[in-house]
Image (cartoon, rainbow, N blue to C red):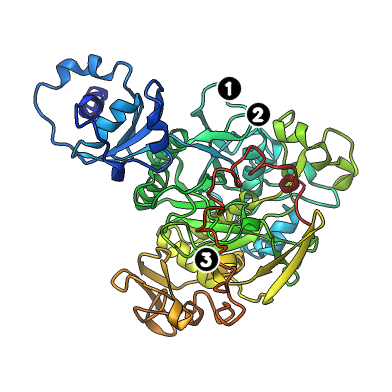
Amino acid sequence: MRSPTSNRLKFLRRSTTIGMLFLAAGSAFADNSKISPDLLPLLSNTNSSINVIVQYQPQSLVGGLLGGVTNLLNGVLNTVFTLLNAGTATLKPVDIINLSNQLNVTYISLDRKLAGTDDYTTAAINSPADWNLGYTGRGVGIAVIDSGVYSHPDLNVANGTQSRVVYHQSFIGGSQADDYGHGTHVAGIIAGNGAASAGGFRSFKGVAPNASIIDLRVLDANGMSNDSAVIKAIQQAVALKSQYNIRVINLSLGRPIYESCSRDPLCQAVEAAWAKGIVVVTAAGNLGRSGYATILSPGNSPHAITVGCMKNMGTYGRNDDQIASYSSRGPSFIDLTVKPDIVAPGNLVDSLMAPNSTLAKTYPGNVVPVSDYSYSAGAPQYIQLSGTSMATPAVSGTVALMLQRTPSLTPDAVKARLMKTATKNFPIYSTTEDGGKAYTDTYDIFTIGAGYLDAEGAVMNNDQVYGSAESLSVLYVPLLNLSVVIPDLTNAWWLTPAFGTSAVWGSTVLQPLASSAVWGSSAVWGSSAVWGSSAVWGSSAVWGSTSGWSTSAVWGSSAVWGSSLNQGEK
């Protein structure tokens, strides 16, 4: 075991190296290829100070650097990440320009702002069948990186007062309280046990009601955060993995995509956690009404399980369920990764309420009256929210059930089993009217991914998975009106008891998506598919100047948590 002195020495050496990088002189002309597109325009204001994340090549340490560490770090370095070769700094434009010309600096991006993107839910995904077999998530730790988790009775051990929220830490300062109310709601969907609604005529129970929650707070009272806070939280989840058996990270949050996942520091943190053996489940986003290619970062991570949102239509069965029109669509911007990976219930979900939180005060009509679920009097305990943020924890809870049954599963095996067992019985399209406007949704793989989460099927699946279940990239061939994917055939394989060896994503290098067992034959690739003139590749698609990524588009203050979204979709 390393001594504290040894760890501190290692940190100081790494910090010194980064400090030298930040202060190094260079050319007066920026290397634009190393500067993110949203950072470049800010460099014209020479007097500004900008918070950035700098990624760099691993350095060979040079003797004698430690002597000047204090001066090097003063006013320059804010954070050194141990999960990534990166750090945060507050720099003047001239320093950013100089830094971009250093050979050992690979990329500089803004420390970007970021926002947070029950009884019906568990019935819709077949969780009760798993509970009846004793799979409740016991012993599995789930890191909820969100706005905090309130000490709600539904998060205690069964018939006791000891909390199953076993760890709290805030990465934004202030108290640990869930001032926003989002994290508590998410934690309830994952692991609420329904204690506060027990004995009534409705019970609000989460998917994994005996799982442990690790509360890592990154969202403030307005549901906002930044990349560096989330990266720190992911890093801490990795550090605490052994202590709390953290096998899952839930990220019900996101922000726009500005570059490839291979350069995006938030996306890279997700990839690093996955490489450490933690399943990362993230929200697709709530921008589906703006069209295709509206997936948020880090949902564009090819390894993460990215979740879209279904509507339960107010019934316990799943046969009538529909996609929510606001659920973000793939492929991912820039990388064209096939996303989402799966869909789950997330519209009009009743779950735990943090009293006096921003969401509870802003949307009092969403607070569930006690009379709706209990014969007893008392303060309300639940609130109704909607979005892919609510669908994501349904998948995280299911992963906990899978890992309780089979602790040896790798993150790739978990993802592949979830996608293969997802049900694929959808209509060709459905139409929703909201606010006097009609929205028509086509059930292609960029809308519903591999299908609708089936917790029973995923938990009981025994297929063996070797290698990577990395989401594929898509290529459109206009002359053939055909979409193809390029799988890594050296890396992604199933071994099924009945059929022997076959590739996870298909057996040929150019594989039409519709023929893959993972996505099923119901994927739409005909004349009514997404390749029409007004679709992904058409003239009015998201790639144009008026796309979802423009400055006047969906990233305003009412974007992620506008009133229409929190009221849900009927």
Q: Position of residue 69 (x, y in %)?
A: 21, 18
Q: Are marks 1 and 2 in contact (CB under 8 Å)?
A: yes
Which image quadrant for residue 100? top left
Q: Secondary structure at mark 2?
A: loop
- Is disc 2 surrounded by few (<14), some (14 to 19) or many (20+) residues within 10 Å? many
Q: Nearer the viewer, residue 303 or 209?
A: 303
Q: Which residue is mark 1?
A: 175
Q: Secondary structure at mark 1?
A: loop
Instruction: Measure how far apart labels 3 and 1 are at the Cα level.
Output: 37 Å
Q: Amino acid at mark 1?
A: Ser
Look at 42% across and 36% down and name the residue there: 41
Decide: is 264 above or below 112: below
Q: Amino acid at mark 2?
A: Asp
Specify the farthest residue to the bottom: 499
- Is the N terminus in the top left, top right, bottom left or bottom right quadrant? top left
Which image quadrant for residue 530? bottom right
405 sits to left or right of 207: left
Q: Which residue is mark 3?
A: 418
Label 3 or label 1, whichever comes before in sequence order: 1
Q: Secondary structure at mark 3?
A: helix
Decide: is 291 above or below 423: above
Q: Position of residue 517 (x, y in %)?
A: 49, 79
Decide: is 93 above or below 342: above
Instruction: Measure how far apart labels 2 and 3 are at the Cα level.
Output: 33 Å
Label 2 or label 3, whichever comes before in sequence order: 2
- Is disc 1 surrounded by few (<14), some (14 to 19) or many (20+) residues within 10 Å? few
Which image quadrant for residue 266? top left
Q: Which residue is mark 2?
A: 179
Q: Are marks 2 and 3 in contact (CB under 8 Å)?
A: no
Instruction: Measure how far apart labels 1 and 2 are at the Cα level.
Output: 9 Å
